[in-house]
Image (cartoon, rainbow, N blue to C red):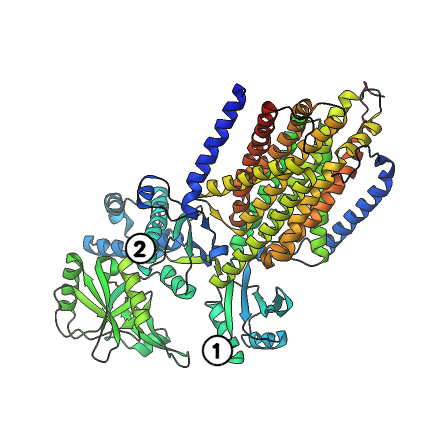
Amino acid sequence: MEKSLKWKFILIVVILVITCFYLAPSVFTMPSWWTSTFPSEKVSLGLDLQGGMHLLLEVETEKALSNTIDRMIGELKDVLLKERIPFDRIERVQNDTLLIEILNPEEYKDKFTKLLGEQFSILEKQSVDEKEKVVTYTLGLTLKEKQYLQTFAVDKGLETIRNRVDEFGVAEPTIQKQSGDRILIQLPGIKDPKRAIDIISRTALLEFKIVNDENDLSKALKGEMPFDSEILYSKLEDKKTGEMTKTPYLLKKNTLLTGEHLTTASVRFDQFNRPYVTLAFDSIGGKIFERITGENIKKRLAIILDNNVYSAPVIKDRIGGGGAIIEGNFTSETARDLAIVLRAGSLPAPVRILEQRTVGPSLGQDSIREGITSTLVGGISVVAFMVIYYQLSGVVANAALLLNILIILAALAAFRATLSLPGIAGIVLTIGMAVDANVLIFERIREEIRAGKTPRAAIDAGYSRAMSAIIDSNLTTIISALFLFQFGTGAIKGFAVTLTIGLTASLFTAIVCTRVVYDYVLSKRRVKKLSI
Amino acid sequence: MELIKPNINIDFIGKIKWALTFSLSLFALSVLSLLLKGGPRYGLDFVGGTVVQVKFANQVDIGEVRAAVDNLTIEGISVQEFGEKDANEYLISMKKTTEELEGISDKIRAVLEQKFGEKSLEIRRVEMVGPKVGKDLRQKGMLAVIFSLIGMLIYIWYRFEFRFGLGAIFCLIHDVVITLGVFSILNKPVDLIIVAALLTIVGYDINDTIIVCDRIRENMKKMTQKNLREVINTSINQTLSRTIITSGTVVIVLIALFFLGGEVLHDFSFSLLIGVFFGTFSSIYVATPLVIYWEKFFPKKKRR
């Protein structure tokens, strides 16, 4: 054997071994000694093939900003009252700005400014409008704080959703941060998409507030709202008729305790076998809860989830030990889901569903079956044609084609990419291009033989002349596939992945692999006539 | 075995006027249809909306399905048959997204079960794309296409002469517009997977054009005594066998996908079939005349 031929041969064997190495776990169940030391990733199927749900959520980060501003307003009020600085109006004007009017500016302006610098460093003055008796400040969140809050809202949201999905129990979920405050969630094989969406996208903000029984609810409903109160509703759905009954509650605005201090939540059943959710607080939460209940005996404490009042029991006594229960019109399933979201914590900002795609398992199976059948039928027809048309050379080309497909699948396993329907389309195009490379070479060899060259010379000339066309056409397609990979989404990306891998492999199989076979045969014996 | 005789010599360039007429009229027809309908009919991916795919266990009349979902009083709700005739599958589509229509698939299931009985149907697929994402996908799809075209043009320009690159790009525009035109005439929606198909056509087309151009480039060096017309005609004839066989094998695979690949691959393979047909045609009759006409208007001094 010639030296270069020997090296090419070794290269092919090495690539073949690596290919089998990565493909083996997808085909066989590997023994434990293998899985502990070697890669054991299987070729994973896309959601369109195995069924499941694809969700794209957007975190409403502006809501995280406005929540912070609302909190700042509360704190400012407390501090101003404590420091005895007179103020008139204080309100939020945009998501990230608030407006405050300080009276008697001459006396209090400096004190207020000092206070701002010391205690409210996340706010900055955007404009100051000074008149004789009143000075109006527009305060906004600093850019740094805004960026922090937005990143935090997305990161914390991601973590919370991951916890919820883990508790819900889905095999191999994908939860990723995307550009522009977006979160991508893929749940393969999910059976009840609506319930999953409910668990994932619920904000689950748990709040405890005192019911305002001193003022008249009916007056408040007509518009005479006490300044420190608000109206929230308890929504109950009748399970038979699906009708919603809404009961209004007049509540003190001030939130006394949130779900932040929860350690766990679990489902219990009462003596009538109705499910309810018990909450356990951490030590801080327990102390706060004890204080609230101690200070508000005989009043009603409302338990509110996402602005929906669940219950408002009368506080009979001070409650120590750090626990509370939520009762409501639960089924055991809704109670369990509520416990899951409470345990995982609330989302720092609400999320919006931008895109949802659900493929049922039966459709996925049909797609796999049809995808595989059609690819097989198409592939086998091409293989048969190649053998009939090019005889033994066709067999060589087919072997290269097979190797090509194996390399694609192995690369998908190695890179942990998924095989989706557009991916199959990419493989089909690769088959076309790979066959084309061989056809180009074979047609050229035939031409050279007709021109009277010996088999050896014809093969040399055929390969070298066809080379430029093969490289040019494969490279241009690879260039476009790379752009598709970079800019494309979903379907386009899946297509670009298999196409790029396939074309690279095709350059190798068509130029190197088939050539080795010819060179080897020609070096072993004198060939008078090529089977082509 | 040989399908094309080795010394075949068809006068392709002689029939150039006929071919160009055929090509231009199809092109004009496509553009006309696209203009009249205000661009291609974009699918769910690009405009946003909701589709629910329902499969019934028994034979169900489409009119009854329509009547049932009309009870939901959702604006712009439409029902169409999906897949093969006896598959009893329907596609229910809405312009709005579930942002406004919470739990729409459950509502649809409820009204249909009320009418046709419980367990009589299966919701096989629900897709909801918000308008914002639709716009995003459209922009990203466009960017992907534009950048890959520019990338290819630069590569061909570098490897060949500018006129070949220009010829190749005209070929691409020709094939993509005609494929979009056929989709527009048949009122088929263009979504992400069709964009992937168009890009495949682009790749295939470039490939085909390059191979003809590569032969022309090679022959221009060898046949210095002949004029450009003859060089091109010889080159097309020499590569004809390869052109037919490659297109043939690709068409075999595509026909398999078209008939056996299921609904999802149906439109995909259909657009590819159109594209491959015109791609083969255009690399002979669109790229090469352009090179010839270019030569007429901007002759190179060396050649007569």
Task: State the mark number for residue A70.
Answer: none
Specify whether disc 2 shares its chain with disc 1. Answer: no
**Residue found at x 65% / y 50%:** B254
- Distance of mark 2 from mark 1, alpha carbons? 35 Å
Indicate the chain on which mark 2 is placed. A
Residue A299 in sight here: yes
Q: Quadrant of the C terminus of chain A?
A: top right
Q: Secondary structure at mark 1?
A: loop
Amino acid marked by disc 1: Glu
Seen from the viewer's position, the closer of residues A287 and A112 is: A287
Q: Residue at x 74, y 29 (%)?
A: A447
Label 1 Cα neighbours within 10 Å, binned few <14 / some 14-19 / many ≥20: few
Q: Which residue is mark 2?
A: A163
Residue type pointed to by label 2 = Asn
In x, y percent, where is residue A376?
58, 50
Residue A519 in the image: x percent, y percent? Answer: 59, 25
Q: Is residue A152 left or right of residue B175?
A: left
Q: Is residue B27 above or below residue B102?
A: above
Q: Which residue is mark 1?
A: B118
**Lateral position of residue A436 relative to residue A201, left or right:** right
Residue A99 seen by the camera? no
Asked if labels 1 and 2 touch by Cβ distance under 8 angstroms, the answer is no
Q: Please tell me whether residue B211 is drawn above or below residue A153 in the rendered image.
A: above
Chain letter for mark 1: B
The part of the image, by quadrant, that contains residue A20 is: top left
Q: Quadrant of residue A475?
A: top right
Q: Position of residue A393 (x, y in %)?
A: 64, 35
The residue carrying pointer 2 sits among few (fewer than 14), some (14 to 19) or many (20 or more) residues within 10 Å by Cα, namely some
Q: Nearer the viewer, residue A146 or A191?
A: A191
The residue depicted at 75 percent of the width and 51 percent of the height is B30
B177 versus B166 height, above or below: below
Q: Residue A220 or B52: which is nearer the viewer?
A: B52
